Structures are given as C-alpha cells and as structure tokens.
Amino acid sequence: MLTRAITGFFFIVVLIGALLLGEVVFTVFYSLVGLGALYEFYGIVRSEENKPLSVLGLISAIVLSALIGWHCIGNMPFKYVWLFIPTFSIHFYM
C-alpha cells in the first residue's frame, strides 16, 4: 500500500508539473496519458470472441489528440478539427 501512495504522490507532482510548464507540455502529456489508457483498455477487452481494432483506434486517437491539441494551443482554427471525420470513418468500413 505504501508503494501505491508513493507512486500516486509522484504522479500528482508530474501532473501539476505538466500543468505549470505550459500548454504544449500539458497537451502532449495528457494526450500520452489518454493513449496509454486506451491501449490498456484494448488489452482488457481483447479476448477470443472480442478482437477490437486497436491499431485503428489508437491511430484515430492520435489524430484527434493532435488536432484538438493544435486547436487548444491556438495554432489551428476549429474548422480544421473536422479533418478527424475521414479518419474516424475508416472504422465503419473495416
């Protein structure tokens, strides 16, 4: 239990550090945390009967994270975030 508490403390320090270091670090860090969580989710769901399209899901998440991140940083207008739709529609053709 002590190991979890120490790990949690350091993770909170890293979260606050990402918040204080600026918007680019914040965006990249939380995008990587989200991708890691998605990868772990695909690992949990995968079984003999369920075979999720994890590669396409991760690619779509990377594209969406990049587009939203660039918009939130202020480098891209929101109308270009809609470029995600063609990438997402690949799921429905597989």
Image (cartoon, rainbow, N blue to C red):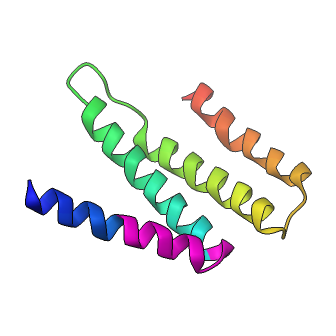
Which residue is more in the foreground, 48 or 25?
Answer: 25
| In this rendering, position of residue 65 left or right of residue 30 | right
Q: Is residue 13 magenta?
A: yes
Q: Is residue 45 above or below residue 26?
A: above
Q: Of residues 76 and 23, which is closer to you in this image?
A: 23
Residue 24, horizontal then vertical, whole percent: 65, 75
Q: Quadrant of the C terminus?
A: top right
Please provide percent x and percent y for residue 18: 52, 73
Q: Residue at x 31, y 45 (%)?
A: 40
Q: Is residue 13 left or right of residue 81?
A: left
Q: Which residues are magenta?
A: 12-24
Q: Is 64 on the left-hand or right-hand side of 48? A: right
Which residue appears at 29% of the width and 66% of the height?
9
The vertical placement of 20 against 2, above or below, is below
Instruction: Give the main secondary structure, helix, strand or loop, of the magenta stretch.
Output: helix
Residue 81 x %, y %? 80, 50
| In-front residue for pair 31/56 | 31
Asked if 47 appears above or below 57 in the picture, the reply is above
Q: Residue furthest top?
A: 49
